[in-house]
Amino acid sequence: MEHKVVDVNSPYPLYRQVADWMRENINAQQWKKNQQLPAEEDLAKQLEVSRGTVRKAISLLIKEGLLIQIQGKGTFVAAPKVAHPFGQELISFAESMEREGIDYETKVIKQEVTVPLLSIRQKLEIAPNENVLYLKRIRYIKDEPVILLENFINLTLCKGIEHSDFEKNTLFSQIEKFSNSKIRHGIRRFEARALTEEQANLLNLDVDMPVLYLEQITFDQEKRPLETSRVWLRSDKYVITSVLTR
Amino acid sequence: MEHKVVDVNSPYPLYRQVADWMRENINAQQWKKNQQLPAEEDLAKQLEVSRGTVRKAISLLIKEGLLIQIQGKGTFVAAPKVAHPFGQELISFAESMEREGIDYETKVIKQEVTVPLLSIRQKLEIAPNENVLYLKRIRYIKDEPVILLENFINLTLCKGIEHSDFEKNTLFSQIEKFSNSKIRHGIRRFEARALTEEQANLLNLDVDMPVLYLEQITFDQEKRPLETSRVWLRSDKYVITSVLTR
DNA sequence: GAGTGGTCTAGACCACTAG
DNA sequence: TAGTGGTCTAGACCACTCT
Protein backbone atom coordinates (compact mmCIF):
# COMPACT_ATOMS: atom_id res chain seq x y z
CA MET A 1 0.00 0.00 0.00
CA GLU A 2 1.33 3.43 -0.97
CA HIS A 3 0.40 5.31 2.15
CA LYS A 4 -2.03 5.22 5.01
CA VAL A 5 -5.52 6.54 4.37
CA VAL A 6 -6.13 7.72 7.89
CA ASP A 7 -3.80 9.72 10.04
CA VAL A 8 -4.47 9.71 13.75
CA ASN A 9 -2.56 12.97 14.09
CA SER A 10 -4.79 14.78 11.63
CA PRO A 11 -7.07 17.45 13.09
CA TYR A 12 -9.98 15.79 11.28
CA PRO A 13 -11.80 12.89 12.89
CA LEU A 14 -11.13 9.47 11.46
CA TYR A 15 -14.63 8.95 10.09
CA ARG A 16 -14.29 12.17 8.08
CA GLN A 17 -10.95 11.07 6.65
CA VAL A 18 -12.49 7.74 5.71
CA ALA A 19 -15.46 9.50 4.09
CA ASP A 20 -13.15 11.80 2.13
CA TRP A 21 -11.18 8.81 0.90
CA MET A 22 -14.36 7.06 -0.17
CA ARG A 23 -15.67 10.15 -1.94
CA GLU A 24 -12.39 10.37 -3.82
CA ASN A 25 -12.67 6.72 -4.85
CA ILE A 26 -16.11 7.43 -6.23
CA ASN A 27 -15.20 10.67 -7.98
CA ALA A 28 -12.13 9.09 -9.54
CA GLN A 29 -14.26 6.17 -10.74
CA GLN A 30 -12.14 3.76 -8.74
CA TRP A 31 -15.48 2.68 -7.47
CA LYS A 32 -17.94 2.75 -10.33
CA LYS A 33 -21.70 3.26 -10.37
CA ASN A 34 -23.65 0.41 -8.83
CA GLN A 35 -20.45 -1.31 -7.81
CA GLN A 36 -20.44 -3.10 -4.50
CA LEU A 37 -18.00 -1.88 -1.87
CA PRO A 38 -15.99 -4.23 0.31
CA ALA A 39 -17.80 -5.31 3.44
CA GLU A 40 -17.65 -2.91 6.38
CA GLU A 41 -15.53 -5.36 8.31
CA ASP A 42 -13.02 -5.62 5.45
CA LEU A 43 -12.81 -1.86 5.01
CA ALA A 44 -12.23 -1.50 8.72
CA LYS A 45 -9.40 -4.03 8.61
CA GLN A 46 -7.87 -2.44 5.53
CA LEU A 47 -7.97 1.11 6.91
CA GLU A 48 -7.06 -0.03 10.42
CA VAL A 49 -10.03 1.55 12.07
CA SER A 50 -13.03 0.06 13.82
CA ARG A 51 -16.19 -0.96 12.06
CA GLY A 52 -18.10 1.81 13.84
CA THR A 53 -15.87 4.42 12.25
CA VAL A 54 -16.41 2.94 8.81
CA ARG A 55 -20.16 2.90 9.40
CA LYS A 56 -20.15 6.56 10.42
CA ALA A 57 -18.25 7.48 7.26
CA ILE A 58 -20.65 5.48 5.11
CA SER A 59 -23.65 7.13 6.72
CA LEU A 60 -22.24 10.53 5.74
CA LEU A 61 -21.99 9.49 2.11
CA ILE A 62 -25.48 8.03 2.20
CA LYS A 63 -26.72 11.44 3.33
CA GLU A 64 -24.88 12.97 0.40
CA GLY A 65 -26.55 10.50 -1.92
CA LEU A 66 -23.32 8.82 -3.01
CA LEU A 67 -23.86 5.42 -1.43
CA ILE A 68 -26.73 3.06 -0.81
CA GLN A 69 -26.88 0.28 1.74
CA ILE A 70 -29.14 -2.75 1.62
CA GLN A 71 -29.24 -5.09 4.55
CA GLY A 72 -28.03 -8.53 3.73
CA LYS A 73 -26.68 -7.48 0.35
CA GLY A 74 -24.08 -4.81 0.77
CA THR A 75 -23.03 -1.22 0.19
CA PHE A 76 -23.20 0.18 -3.34
CA VAL A 77 -22.21 3.30 -5.22
CA ALA A 78 -25.45 5.14 -5.96
CA ALA A 79 -26.39 5.39 -9.61
CA PRO A 80 -27.86 8.87 -10.02
CA LYS A 81 -25.49 11.74 -9.39
CA VAL A 82 -27.14 14.35 -7.24
CA ALA A 83 -27.04 17.88 -8.50
CA HIS A 84 -26.96 19.59 -5.16
CA PRO A 85 -27.10 17.66 -1.90
CA PHE A 86 -29.20 20.32 -0.43
CA GLY A 87 -31.60 19.21 2.18
CA GLN A 88 -29.22 17.37 4.45
CA GLU A 89 -25.99 19.14 4.94
CA LEU A 90 -25.42 22.80 5.61
CA ILE A 91 -23.28 23.72 2.69
CA SER A 92 -22.86 27.00 0.91
CA PHE A 93 -23.52 27.32 -2.78
CA ALA A 94 -19.85 27.96 -3.32
CA GLU A 95 -18.85 24.81 -1.45
CA SER A 96 -21.40 22.76 -3.32
CA MET A 97 -20.21 24.00 -6.69
CA GLU A 98 -16.61 23.34 -5.76
CA ARG A 99 -17.40 19.84 -4.64
CA GLU A 100 -19.16 19.21 -7.94
CA GLY A 101 -16.30 20.67 -9.90
CA ILE A 102 -18.44 23.42 -11.41
CA ASP A 103 -16.62 26.57 -12.49
CA TYR A 104 -18.29 29.70 -11.29
CA GLU A 105 -17.60 33.37 -10.83
CA THR A 106 -18.86 35.76 -8.23
CA LYS A 107 -19.56 39.43 -8.79
CA VAL A 108 -20.09 41.71 -5.82
CA ILE A 109 -22.72 44.34 -6.63
CA LYS A 110 -22.90 46.00 -3.27
CA GLN A 111 -20.93 45.70 -0.04
CA GLU A 112 -21.76 48.16 2.71
CA VAL A 113 -22.12 48.52 6.44
CA THR A 114 -25.66 49.49 7.31
CA VAL A 115 -28.38 49.41 9.95
CA PRO A 116 -30.88 46.82 8.82
CA LEU A 117 -34.65 46.65 8.96
CA LEU A 118 -36.51 45.11 11.84
CA SER A 119 -37.10 41.76 10.13
CA ILE A 120 -33.37 41.30 9.68
CA ARG A 121 -32.61 42.46 13.21
CA GLN A 122 -35.00 39.89 14.57
CA LYS A 123 -33.39 37.11 12.61
CA LEU A 124 -29.92 38.13 13.75
CA GLU A 125 -31.12 38.87 17.30
CA ILE A 126 -29.38 42.26 17.36
CA ALA A 127 -30.26 45.67 18.84
CA PRO A 128 -31.58 48.58 16.72
CA ASN A 129 -28.22 50.37 16.79
CA GLU A 130 -26.07 47.42 15.73
CA ASN A 131 -24.61 47.34 12.26
CA VAL A 132 -24.59 44.57 9.73
CA LEU A 133 -22.63 44.03 6.56
CA TYR A 134 -24.95 44.01 3.59
CA LEU A 135 -23.70 42.05 0.64
CA LYS A 136 -25.33 41.64 -2.73
CA ARG A 137 -23.74 39.22 -5.14
CA ILE A 138 -24.38 37.34 -8.33
CA ARG A 139 -22.99 33.93 -9.17
CA TYR A 140 -22.31 33.09 -12.78
CA ILE A 141 -21.86 29.67 -14.32
CA LYS A 142 -20.45 29.75 -17.83
CA ASP A 143 -21.00 33.52 -17.96
CA GLU A 144 -24.67 33.09 -17.25
CA PRO A 145 -26.19 34.55 -14.08
CA VAL A 146 -27.70 31.78 -12.00
CA ILE A 147 -27.90 32.86 -8.37
CA LEU A 148 -28.62 36.21 -6.80
CA LEU A 149 -27.62 36.50 -3.15
CA GLU A 150 -28.28 39.08 -0.47
CA ASN A 151 -26.50 38.52 2.82
CA PHE A 152 -26.80 40.31 6.13
CA ILE A 153 -23.83 39.48 8.32
CA ASN A 154 -23.75 40.05 12.05
CA LEU A 155 -20.87 42.51 12.49
CA THR A 156 -20.87 42.21 16.26
CA LEU A 157 -19.86 38.59 15.86
CA CYS A 158 -17.76 39.02 12.71
CA LYS A 159 -15.74 42.17 13.37
CA GLY A 160 -13.51 43.15 10.47
CA ILE A 161 -15.28 41.05 7.84
CA GLU A 162 -16.50 44.19 6.09
CA HIS A 163 -13.11 44.60 4.39
CA SER A 164 -12.99 41.11 2.91
CA ASP A 165 -12.89 40.49 -0.81
CA PHE A 166 -15.93 38.36 -1.52
CA GLU A 167 -15.11 37.84 -5.16
CA LYS A 168 -12.07 35.84 -4.10
CA ASN A 169 -13.26 34.30 -0.83
CA THR A 170 -16.43 32.47 0.07
CA LEU A 171 -18.72 33.99 2.65
CA PHE A 172 -18.61 30.94 4.91
CA SER A 173 -14.81 30.92 5.03
CA GLN A 174 -14.68 34.61 5.94
CA ILE A 175 -17.37 34.28 8.57
CA GLU A 176 -15.52 31.42 10.25
CA LYS A 177 -12.30 33.41 10.09
CA PHE A 178 -13.58 36.69 11.51
CA SER A 179 -16.10 35.32 13.99
CA ASN A 180 -13.50 32.89 15.26
CA SER A 181 -16.18 30.25 15.56
CA LYS A 182 -17.58 27.39 13.56
CA ILE A 183 -20.73 27.47 11.48
CA ARG A 184 -22.78 24.62 12.80
CA HIS A 185 -26.31 24.65 11.56
CA GLY A 186 -28.83 26.58 9.58
CA ILE A 187 -32.49 26.94 8.81
CA ARG A 188 -33.65 27.26 5.25
CA ARG A 189 -37.09 28.12 4.06
CA PHE A 190 -38.19 27.51 0.49
CA GLU A 191 -40.61 29.53 -1.52
CA ALA A 192 -41.44 30.35 -5.08
CA ARG A 193 -41.31 33.99 -6.01
CA ALA A 194 -41.71 36.30 -8.94
CA LEU A 195 -38.86 38.69 -9.63
CA THR A 196 -38.75 42.45 -9.34
CA GLU A 197 -37.67 44.24 -12.46
CA GLU A 198 -34.22 44.95 -11.06
CA GLN A 199 -33.71 41.34 -10.07
CA ALA A 200 -34.94 40.12 -13.42
CA ASN A 201 -32.35 42.31 -15.12
CA LEU A 202 -29.59 41.00 -12.91
CA LEU A 203 -30.54 37.40 -13.55
CA ASN A 204 -31.21 38.00 -17.22
CA LEU A 205 -34.78 36.74 -16.96
CA ASP A 206 -38.27 37.97 -17.63
CA VAL A 207 -40.05 39.67 -14.80
CA ASP A 208 -42.79 37.10 -14.51
CA MET A 209 -40.47 34.12 -14.62
CA PRO A 210 -40.80 32.21 -11.36
CA VAL A 211 -37.62 31.56 -9.41
CA LEU A 212 -36.81 29.51 -6.39
CA TYR A 213 -36.47 31.79 -3.40
CA LEU A 214 -34.98 30.83 -0.10
CA GLU A 215 -34.29 32.48 3.18
CA GLN A 216 -31.61 31.20 5.43
CA ILE A 217 -30.26 31.84 8.89
CA THR A 218 -26.86 30.42 9.77
CA PHE A 219 -25.83 29.73 13.38
CA ASP A 220 -22.60 28.96 15.19
CA GLN A 221 -22.06 26.18 17.69
CA GLU A 222 -23.58 28.35 20.42
CA LYS A 223 -26.74 28.86 18.37
CA ARG A 224 -25.91 32.54 17.78
CA PRO A 225 -27.09 33.81 14.39
CA LEU A 226 -24.08 34.72 12.28
CA GLU A 227 -25.80 35.58 9.06
CA THR A 228 -29.13 35.67 7.33
CA SER A 229 -29.60 35.68 3.61
CA ARG A 230 -32.06 35.77 0.78
CA VAL A 231 -31.31 33.81 -2.34
CA TRP A 232 -32.95 33.81 -5.74
CA LEU A 233 -32.17 30.79 -7.90
CA ARG A 234 -32.84 30.22 -11.55
CA SER A 235 -34.29 26.75 -11.26
CA ASP A 236 -33.95 26.27 -14.99
CA LYS A 237 -30.18 26.47 -14.64
CA TYR A 238 -29.40 25.23 -11.19
CA VAL A 239 -31.31 22.31 -9.78
CA ILE A 240 -31.75 21.66 -6.12
CA THR A 241 -32.07 18.00 -5.32
CA SER A 242 -32.25 16.25 -2.03
CA VAL A 243 -31.90 12.63 -1.07
CA LEU A 244 -34.04 11.63 1.85
CA THR A 245 -34.11 8.50 3.94
CA ARG A 246 -36.72 7.01 6.13
CA MET B 1 -41.05 4.72 37.90
CA GLU B 2 -44.40 3.83 36.32
CA HIS B 3 -43.14 1.61 33.55
CA LYS B 4 -40.14 0.97 31.41
CA VAL B 5 -39.54 3.26 28.45
CA VAL B 6 -37.83 0.68 26.33
CA ASP B 7 -38.94 -2.86 25.71
CA VAL B 8 -36.34 -5.26 24.38
CA ASN B 9 -39.10 -7.46 22.98
CA SER B 10 -40.54 -4.67 20.88
CA PRO B 11 -40.11 -5.02 17.11
CA TYR B 12 -38.71 -1.49 17.08
CA PRO B 13 -35.03 -0.88 17.75
CA LEU B 14 -34.16 0.61 21.10
CA TYR B 15 -32.90 3.90 19.71
CA ARG B 16 -36.24 4.43 17.98
CA GLN B 17 -38.15 3.75 21.18
CA VAL B 18 -35.90 6.19 23.01
CA ALA B 19 -36.43 8.81 20.28
CA ASP B 20 -40.20 8.34 20.42
CA TRP B 21 -40.15 8.78 24.17
CA MET B 22 -38.09 11.95 23.84
CA ARG B 23 -40.39 13.35 21.14
CA GLU B 24 -43.32 12.70 23.43
CA ASN B 25 -41.58 14.53 26.27
CA ILE B 26 -41.09 17.51 23.99
CA ASN B 27 -44.59 17.50 22.51
CA ALA B 28 -46.15 17.19 25.96
CA GLN B 29 -44.00 20.09 27.17
CA GLN B 30 -42.42 17.88 29.79
CA TRP B 31 -39.26 19.20 28.27
CA LYS B 32 -39.79 22.84 27.43
CA LYS B 33 -38.17 25.02 24.79
CA ASN B 34 -34.51 25.74 25.41
CA GLN B 35 -34.50 23.43 28.39
CA GLN B 36 -31.42 21.34 28.93
CA LEU B 37 -31.83 17.58 28.83
CA PRO B 38 -30.11 15.27 31.29
CA ALA B 39 -26.61 14.26 30.22
CA GLU B 40 -26.38 11.39 27.77
CA GLU B 41 -24.79 9.22 30.44
CA ASP B 42 -27.65 9.91 32.86
CA LEU B 43 -30.31 9.22 30.24
CA ALA B 44 -28.58 5.96 29.40
CA LYS B 45 -28.56 4.94 33.06
CA GLN B 46 -32.19 5.96 33.54
CA LEU B 47 -33.44 4.13 30.46
CA GLU B 48 -31.09 1.19 31.03
CA VAL B 49 -29.54 1.37 27.60
CA SER B 50 -26.04 2.23 26.48
CA ARG B 51 -24.87 5.75 25.77
CA GLY B 52 -24.49 4.90 22.08
CA THR B 53 -28.19 4.09 21.85
CA VAL B 54 -29.10 7.38 23.51
CA ARG B 55 -26.79 9.25 21.11
CA LYS B 56 -28.41 7.58 18.11
CA ALA B 57 -31.86 8.60 19.34
CA ILE B 58 -30.71 12.16 19.94
CA SER B 59 -29.19 12.37 16.47
CA LEU B 60 -32.57 11.45 14.99
CA LEU B 61 -34.28 14.29 16.83
CA ILE B 62 -31.53 16.69 15.79
CA LYS B 63 -32.29 15.79 12.19
CA GLU B 64 -35.94 16.52 12.86
CA GLY B 65 -34.96 19.88 14.30
CA LEU B 66 -36.28 19.14 17.78
CA LEU B 67 -32.98 19.08 19.66
CA ILE B 68 -29.70 20.94 19.58
CA GLN B 69 -26.39 19.75 20.96
CA ILE B 70 -23.48 21.94 21.94
CA GLN B 71 -20.23 20.33 22.91
CA GLY B 72 -19.26 21.06 26.46
CA LYS B 73 -22.65 22.52 27.30
CA GLY B 74 -25.34 19.98 26.73
CA THR B 75 -28.41 18.92 24.79
CA PHE B 76 -31.31 21.36 24.50
CA VAL B 77 -34.83 21.46 23.19
CA ALA B 78 -34.74 23.55 20.02
CA ALA B 79 -36.54 26.87 20.22
CA PRO B 80 -38.07 27.38 16.80
CA LYS B 81 -40.67 24.86 15.78
CA VAL B 82 -40.01 23.74 12.26
CA ALA B 83 -42.91 23.99 9.88
CA HIS B 84 -42.01 20.98 7.81
CA PRO B 85 -38.88 18.97 8.51
CA PHE B 86 -38.39 18.54 4.89
CA GLY B 87 -34.88 18.21 3.74
CA GLN B 88 -33.78 15.43 6.03
CA GLU B 89 -36.31 12.74 6.42
CA LEU B 90 -38.41 11.10 3.78
CA ILE B 91 -41.85 11.87 5.00
CA SER B 92 -45.06 12.30 3.12
CA PHE B 93 -47.06 15.48 3.34
CA ALA B 94 -49.78 13.58 5.13
CA GLU B 95 -47.36 12.23 7.73
CA SER B 96 -45.84 15.63 8.24
CA MET B 97 -49.21 17.27 8.77
CA GLU B 98 -50.26 14.54 11.16
CA ARG B 99 -47.09 14.90 13.16
CA GLU B 100 -47.69 18.64 13.39
CA GLY B 101 -51.28 18.15 14.38
CA ILE B 102 -52.60 20.00 11.34
CA ASP B 103 -56.11 19.08 10.21
CA TYR B 104 -56.34 18.47 6.51
CA GLU B 105 -58.62 16.91 3.97
CA THR B 106 -57.81 15.11 0.78
CA LYS B 107 -59.93 15.16 -2.34
CA VAL B 108 -59.26 12.67 -5.11
CA ILE B 109 -59.84 14.29 -8.50
CA LYS B 110 -58.76 11.44 -10.67
CA GLN B 111 -57.75 7.82 -10.06
CA GLU B 112 -57.16 5.63 -13.07
CA VAL B 113 -54.97 2.89 -14.44
CA THR B 114 -53.07 4.10 -17.47
CA VAL B 115 -49.99 3.70 -19.61
CA PRO B 116 -47.71 6.62 -18.80
CA LEU B 117 -45.48 8.79 -20.90
CA LEU B 118 -41.83 8.01 -21.48
CA SER B 119 -40.53 10.41 -18.82
CA ILE B 120 -42.60 8.64 -16.17
CA ARG B 121 -41.62 5.20 -17.46
CA GLN B 122 -37.98 6.13 -17.17
CA LYS B 123 -38.37 7.30 -13.62
CA LEU B 124 -40.20 4.12 -12.64
CA GLU B 125 -37.90 1.93 -14.74
CA ILE B 126 -40.82 0.12 -16.37
CA ALA B 127 -41.49 -1.24 -19.85
CA PRO B 128 -43.72 0.54 -22.41
CA ASN B 129 -46.59 -1.89 -21.85
CA GLU B 130 -46.65 -1.71 -18.06
CA ASN B 131 -49.47 0.12 -16.33
CA VAL B 132 -49.31 2.66 -13.56
CA LEU B 133 -51.95 4.07 -11.26
CA TYR B 134 -52.40 7.76 -11.93
CA LEU B 135 -53.67 9.73 -8.99
CA LYS B 136 -54.51 13.41 -8.85
CA ARG B 137 -55.36 14.85 -5.48
CA ILE B 138 -55.77 18.14 -3.67
CA ARG B 139 -55.00 18.68 0.00
CA TYR B 140 -57.01 21.27 1.88
CA ILE B 141 -56.12 22.94 5.15
CA LYS B 142 -59.03 24.79 6.73
CA ASP B 143 -61.04 24.41 3.52
CA GLU B 144 -58.35 26.12 1.52
CA PRO B 145 -56.52 24.26 -1.24
CA VAL B 146 -52.81 24.15 -0.47
CA ILE B 147 -51.21 21.22 -2.24
CA LEU B 148 -51.87 19.70 -5.63
CA LEU B 149 -50.45 16.22 -6.12
CA GLU B 150 -50.05 13.96 -9.12
CA ASN B 151 -48.76 10.48 -8.42
CA PHE B 152 -47.72 7.68 -10.74
CA ILE B 153 -47.56 4.42 -8.86
CA ASN B 154 -45.73 1.34 -10.12
CA LEU B 155 -48.53 -1.23 -10.46
CA THR B 156 -46.13 -4.08 -11.08
CA LEU B 157 -44.77 -3.58 -7.58
CA CYS B 158 -48.04 -2.50 -5.96
CA LYS B 159 -50.64 -4.89 -7.37
CA GLY B 160 -54.14 -4.18 -6.13
CA ILE B 161 -53.48 -0.64 -4.94
CA GLU B 162 -55.70 0.77 -7.69
CA HIS B 163 -58.82 -0.01 -5.64
CA SER B 164 -57.67 1.82 -2.49
CA ASP B 165 -59.55 4.78 -1.10
CA PHE B 166 -57.02 7.59 -1.07
CA GLU B 167 -59.31 10.04 0.65
CA LYS B 168 -59.18 7.84 3.75
CA ASN B 169 -55.70 6.34 3.46
CA THR B 170 -52.33 7.94 2.82
CA LEU B 171 -50.45 6.97 -0.29
CA PHE B 172 -47.37 5.81 1.61
CA SER B 173 -49.39 3.47 3.84
CA GLN B 174 -51.12 1.89 0.84
CA ILE B 175 -47.88 1.53 -1.08
CA GLU B 176 -46.24 -0.27 1.80
CA LYS B 177 -49.29 -2.49 2.21
CA PHE B 178 -49.68 -3.53 -1.42
CA SER B 179 -46.03 -3.67 -2.42
CA ASN B 180 -45.27 -5.68 0.70
CA SER B 181 -42.04 -3.75 1.10
CA LYS B 182 -40.76 -0.74 2.96
CA ILE B 183 -40.29 2.74 1.54
CA ARG B 184 -36.70 3.54 2.25
CA HIS B 185 -35.51 6.61 0.42
CA GLY B 186 -36.44 9.22 -2.09
CA ILE B 187 -35.10 11.91 -4.33
CA ARG B 188 -36.72 15.30 -4.44
CA ARG B 189 -36.06 18.08 -6.84
CA PHE B 190 -37.18 21.64 -6.20
CA GLU B 191 -38.23 24.20 -8.72
CA ALA B 192 -40.36 27.27 -9.03
CA ARG B 193 -43.14 27.11 -11.55
CA ALA B 194 -46.00 29.11 -12.89
CA LEU B 195 -49.39 27.43 -12.90
CA THR B 196 -51.50 26.32 -15.81
CA GLU B 197 -54.99 27.70 -15.84
CA GLU B 198 -56.49 24.42 -14.69
CA GLN B 199 -54.03 24.12 -11.82
CA ALA B 200 -54.62 27.72 -10.83
CA ASN B 201 -58.34 27.04 -10.60
CA LEU B 202 -57.79 23.97 -8.49
CA LEU B 203 -55.49 25.81 -6.10
CA ASN B 204 -57.65 28.91 -6.11
CA LEU B 205 -54.79 31.12 -7.30
CA ASP B 206 -54.00 33.44 -10.16
CA VAL B 207 -52.35 31.92 -13.19
CA ASP B 208 -49.16 33.91 -12.88
CA MET B 209 -48.72 33.25 -9.17
CA PRO B 210 -45.49 31.33 -8.64
CA VAL B 211 -45.71 28.09 -6.71
CA LEU B 212 -43.16 25.69 -5.35
CA TYR B 213 -42.93 22.69 -7.60
CA LEU B 214 -41.27 19.46 -6.76
CA GLU B 215 -40.69 16.14 -8.38
CA GLN B 216 -40.08 13.06 -6.35
CA ILE B 217 -39.17 9.45 -6.83
CA THR B 218 -39.67 7.04 -3.95
CA PHE B 219 -37.71 3.80 -3.65
CA ASP B 220 -37.96 0.66 -1.57
CA GLN B 221 -35.13 -1.01 0.30
CA GLU B 222 -33.97 -2.69 -2.90
CA LYS B 223 -33.76 0.65 -4.69
CA ARG B 224 -36.74 -0.17 -6.88
CA PRO B 225 -38.84 2.87 -7.77
CA LEU B 226 -42.28 2.54 -6.22
CA GLU B 227 -43.74 5.86 -7.15
CA THR B 228 -42.98 9.16 -8.78
CA SER B 229 -44.90 12.31 -8.21
CA ARG B 230 -45.28 15.96 -9.06
CA VAL B 231 -46.36 18.36 -6.39
CA TRP B 232 -47.44 21.97 -6.54
CA LEU B 233 -47.35 23.84 -3.26
CA ARG B 234 -48.79 27.20 -2.36
CA SER B 235 -45.76 28.58 -0.60
CA ASP B 236 -47.85 31.38 0.84
CA LYS B 237 -49.86 28.83 2.81
CA TYR B 238 -47.51 25.95 3.44
CA VAL B 239 -43.92 26.63 4.27
CA ILE B 240 -41.13 24.20 3.65
CA THR B 241 -38.33 24.59 6.12
CA SER B 242 -35.27 22.53 6.63
CA VAL B 243 -32.77 22.36 9.43
CA LEU B 244 -29.29 21.58 8.25
CA THR B 245 -26.15 20.69 10.12
CA ARG B 246 -22.55 20.85 9.22
C1' DG C 1 -11.45 20.69 37.87
C1' DA C 2 -16.05 19.00 36.95
C1' DG C 3 -19.33 18.23 33.53
C1' DT C 4 -20.67 17.95 28.97
C1' DG C 5 -20.70 16.09 24.22
C1' DG C 6 -17.37 13.99 20.33
C1' DT C 7 -14.79 10.13 18.86
C1' DC C 8 -13.16 5.50 18.77
C1' DT C 9 -12.61 0.63 19.88
C1' DA C 10 -13.55 -4.50 20.24
C1' DG C 11 -16.72 -7.57 20.52
C1' DA C 12 -21.34 -9.53 20.43
C1' DC C 13 -25.66 -10.94 18.51
C1' DC C 14 -29.61 -10.27 15.31
C1' DA C 15 -32.01 -9.77 10.62
C1' DC C 16 -31.89 -10.16 5.99
C1' DT C 17 -30.16 -12.04 1.38
C1' DA C 18 -28.59 -15.45 -1.49
C1' DG C 19 -26.82 -19.79 -3.10
C1' DT D 1 -25.06 -21.85 5.49
C1' DA D 2 -22.13 -17.93 4.65
C1' DG D 3 -21.98 -13.16 4.04
C1' DT D 4 -23.85 -8.85 4.59
C1' DG D 5 -25.56 -4.80 7.13
C1' DG D 6 -28.34 -3.36 11.70
C1' DT D 7 -28.21 -2.92 16.55
C1' DC D 8 -26.26 -2.70 21.06
C1' DT D 9 -22.91 -2.75 24.79
C1' DA D 10 -19.08 -1.19 27.98
C1' DG D 11 -15.44 1.25 28.31
C1' DA D 12 -11.93 4.59 27.04
C1' DC D 13 -10.05 9.04 26.02
C1' DC D 14 -10.40 13.69 23.95
C1' DA D 15 -12.29 18.59 23.24
C1' DC D 16 -14.90 22.05 24.82
C1' DT D 17 -17.45 25.06 28.36
C1' DC D 18 -18.04 26.98 32.65
C1' DT D 19 -16.76 28.24 37.32
Image (cartoon, coloured by chain):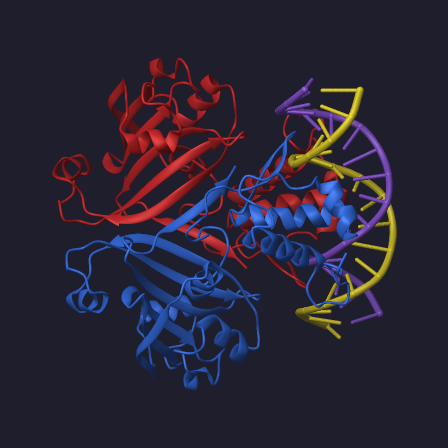
Chain colours: A red, B blue, C yellow, D purple
Near-viewer residue (B243 or A71): B243
Asked if residue A5 can be seen in this view, the reply is no
State left or right for residue B224 relative to residue A237: right
Residue A142 location (% of width, % of height): 27, 36
Above or below for B48 versus C5: below
Residue B91 location (% of width, % of height): 48, 61
Above or below for B222 versus B55: below
Near-viewer residue (D1 or B175): B175
Asked if residue B245 can be seen in this view, the reply is yes
State left or right for residue A99 relative to residue A236: right
Residue D3 location (% of width, % of height): 75, 60
State left or right for residue D19 relative to residue A129: right
Q: Quadrant of residue B231?
A: bottom left
Query: Which residue is depicted at the point 47% across and 20% down?
Result: A179
Near-viewer residue (B132 or A129): A129
State left or right for residue A69 relative to residue A182: right
Q: Quadrant of residue C15?
A: bottom right
Near-viewer residue (A167 or D2): A167
Residue B177 location (% of width, % of height): 54, 78
